[in-house]
Amino acid sequence: MNRRDALKLASVAIALPATRLAWASENYLVLDPAQKGDDPSKIEVIEFFHYGCPHCRDFDPLVTAWKKKLPADVVFRPVPAVWNNAQLGGLARLYYAAEITGERDKLQSAIFAAVQDEKRPLFNEEQVREWVTGKVADPAKFIETYKSFGVGSQVQRADQLARAMKIQGVPSMVIDGRFVTSASMSGSHENTLKVADELIARVRKERAGK
């Protein structure tokens, strides 16, 4: 799903940074300048997604199985796309609350289903409180986390990352802050993961000076 479709119900003006994208192959793009990861000792892989995207829902079980096999020098990080939109920001806040409280794996499929199948709005505290009750062990703790400054900061950071990395569609993967790939480039979700593996191997060789 591209950014225009995701934001079709909102008019959003975003000042995009000077980051450029250039084709390096038919399967991926190169970010210029590259974006630094949180841990320079690791090869960081970021998946940008959002819960309203059916392609992200299809990709989720594939990337979940894939990440379990990643070597120790690779760190995987899902990042919800926000694009300066309040509704997507609410879904991002829900994601980070689930992640911090340890409920992400339990709730992930249910959130996709609630948003896409039930057309349920989960964009604010009241809506999330009603939905999450009965689904997690401690709803009060979940909502406290949802409202927290820390979660708000992560949502802001997610929006900044998507802008810096010029993400215009989801699901997209960014490898080492340098390479961007997606099914629209690689041809399929499965191929996206293959391209990601190849780029991880490339980064590893470059870091080893080979």
Image (tube, rainbow, N blue to C red):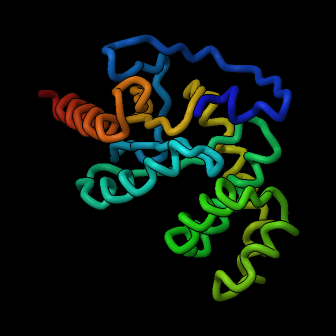
Left or right, residue 69 beside residue 8: left
Tell me where residue 118 appears, x and y as whole percent. Answer: 71, 61
**Does 24 sit left or right of 165 as displayed?**
left
Q: Quadrant of residue 124?
A: bottom right
Query: Residue 23 location, x and y as percent?
Result: 39, 12
Side of 77 relative to 167 (left or right) = left
Q: Residue at x 40, y 29 (%)?
A: 181
**x and y percent of residue 157 in the render?**
66, 44
Name the residue located 48 percent from the left edge and 43 percent from the top edge.
47
Relative to 107, does residue 4 appear above or below in the rendering?
Answer: above
Q: Is residue 179 visible?
A: yes
Give the camera-side residue of 187 and 137.
Answer: 187
Q: Residue at x 58, y 24 (%)?
A: 166
How many numbered marks have been drawn onto this rendered protein structure? 0
Point out the image quarter for the N terminus. top right
**Quarter of the figure with residue 54:** top right
For the C terminus, which image quadrant? top left
